[in-house]
Image (cartoon, rainbow, N blue to C red):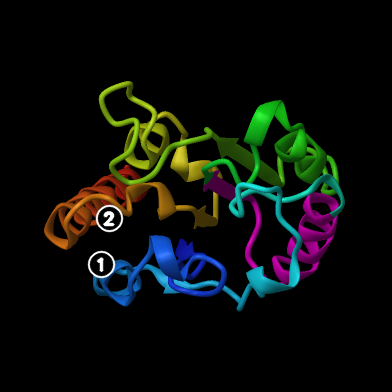
Amino acid sequence: MQLLYAVLHSPPWLSISDPTMDDSLRRHGFLPFADVRWEEYHYLDDGLHFTPTSESSFLDDLKHRVHNLSFPLLILSDSTFSHNGSDAAQRFESMFPPDDVVVDAVSGSGFLQLGRQGLNFTSRLRRHPLHRFRTVLVIGGWNDHGHTALRFDSAVEGFAHAFAGRTRS
């Protein structure tokens, strides 16, 4: 089973990420996913979330980028798929045969963020029967930018342990 992540420290996210975040993910067994050119999309005035047109473009681009992955695919994400009630997760899932892609998206989540509510990436990973999936792709982590590198690394390590434990079951 593959464990992939969308690179965090890239434009336009340079102000809310740093290279140590990507280093931590790689150190704990994540593989970088195909280069997503985030800077090619247009964003709302907040500078963080896609405009409706760019959201559609992103979904189309992502569909082409995942075609070489092993299916079924589980995507754990933040507001990339769920900003302001967006139906992007459902639209993306509908681009594939039933049960080939599951998108679990919670706005504001991350490896640490929303952990107290049980909605961080690790908590949500544990809710899925991982034996069903061949690939897990995490798109997010930017919401964790206010935490120390040590806390982020610890959370990523916890995710990796949960992933390894669930894939052995």
Find residue 160 and name its label. 2
Which residue occupies the extreme left position in the image?
A: 150
Residue type pointed to by label 1 = His
Q: Is residue 158 above or below residue 27?
A: above
Q: How many marks?
A: 2
Q: Quadrant of the C terminus?
A: top left
In the rendered structure, find residue 66 and report the number of the disc placed on it.
Answer: none
Residue 64 located left or right of residue 15 = right
Residue at 32% across, 74% down:
26
Q: Position of residue 111 (x, y in %)?
A: 33, 46
User: SS at mark 1?
Assistant: loop
User: Residue 28 bears which disc, if any?
Assistant: 1
Q: Does the magenta run of residues contain 60?
A: yes
Question: Helix, strand or loop at disc 2?
Answer: helix
Magenta stretch containing residue 57, yes or no? Answer: yes
The disc labelled 2 sits on which kind of residue?
Ala
> Going 28% across and 49% down the picture, which residue do you hit?
159
Seen in the picture, residue 163 relative to 98 is either above or below; the reply is below
Q: Position of residue 91 (x, y in %)?
A: 82, 39
Q: Residue at x 61, y 47 (%)?
A: 46
List x then y, in percent, for residue 160: 27, 55
First in sequence: mark 1 vs mark 2: 1
The residue stretch that appears in magenta: 54-76
Q: Is residue 19 left or right of residue 132?
A: left
Horizontal side of residue 101 vs 29, given as left or right:
right
Q: Is residue 91 above or below residue 36?
A: above
